[in-house]
């Protein structure tokens, strides 16, 4: 099983949406027994909460139903996951702080490494903005995910439907 972890700050906006998008793709590509997905946040702010109501509404409008309880990133995640994708540079830095020796550096990357439109930019934090910020996040994640899946299936020689 290839294990993917998405990371943002609160785990109620960006990363649960990324998780939902990838899960939906995995299902349509018939890769559910090959790839597993989870998400978390680097802060404690929303531990145990469901995604933000605006995240849920946005997901629904894009045909996705999210089912996730916020949790905080932990050291064990480095061992439990193969690819750790941070939504922005600040949270990538937060993740790296937990890996003081740099042992797991190769497992970590920025989500928008896979965005052909604006490579290595941040997925902007939509928390303090309006609904349109959530749709912007969705669109960034949606197009980046296609490239990420392409990269992953090539790297691991996965057969897709
Ligand atoms: P997320 O968004 O990191 O995409 O889940 C945020 C959620 C909550 C906060 C900041 C960003 N907050 O400050 O509580």
Image (tube, grey):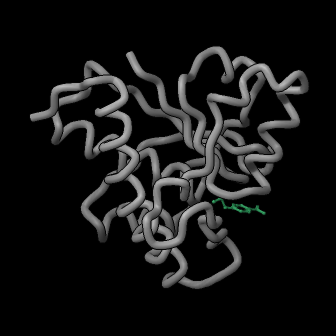
**Quadrant position of residue 95:** top right
Q: Nearer the viewer, residue 59 or 15?
A: 15
Q: Could you tell whether 62 is left or right of 55 in the image?
A: left
Residue appearing at x 44%, y 32% in the figure: 37
Q: What is the quadrant of residue 69 in the picture?
A: top right
Residue 82 appears at what percent x and percent y?
54, 23
Q: Residue at x 30, y 21 (%)?
A: 34
Which image quarter is the C terminus in? top left
Q: Position of residue 96 (x, y in %)?
A: 81, 37
- Depth check, front residue: 96 or 68: 96
- Write the residue at 76% across / 43% down: 42
Position of residue 54 relative to residue 25, above or below, is below
Q: Is residue 39 left or right of residue 153?
A: right
Q: Nearer the viewer, residue 138 or 89?
A: 89
Instruction: Say if 67 sits above or below 116 in the image.
Output: above
Front position in the image: 57 or 106? 106
What x and y, as percent, mark residue 116?
43, 65
Q: Quadrant of the N terminus?
A: top left
Q: Is residue 18 above or below residue 156?
A: below
Please give the count of numbered marks on the rendered protein: 0
Residue at 68% in and 58% down: 88
Left or right of 120, for residue 75: right
x and y percentages locating residue 86 in the rendered image: 64, 48
- As drawn, which residue projects farthest toward the left? 161
Which corner quadrant of the figure contains ligand 1? Answer: bottom right
Left or right: 70 as drawn, with respect to 101: left
């Amino acid at each position: 099983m290839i294990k993917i972890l998405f990371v943002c700050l609160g785990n109620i906006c960006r990363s649960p949406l990324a998780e939902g998008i990838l899960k939906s793709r995995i299902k349509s590509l018939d890769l559910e027994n090959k790839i597993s997905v989870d998400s978390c946040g680097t802060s404690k702010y929303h531990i145990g909460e469901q995604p933000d109501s605006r995240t849920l509404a946005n997901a629904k409008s894009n045909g996705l139903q999210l089912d996730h309880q916020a949790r905080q990133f932990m050291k064990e995640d480095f061992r439990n996951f193969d690819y750790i994708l941070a939504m922005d540079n600040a949270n990538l830095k937060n993740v790296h702080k937990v890996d003081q020796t740099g042992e797991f550096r190769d497992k970590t990357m920025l989500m928008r490494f896979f965005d052909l439109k604006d490579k290595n930019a941040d997925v902007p934090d939509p928390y303090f903005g309006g609904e349109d910020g959530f749709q912007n996040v969705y669109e960034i994640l949606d197009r980046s995910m296609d490239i990420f899946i392409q990269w992953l299936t090539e790297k691991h020689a996965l057969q897709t439907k």
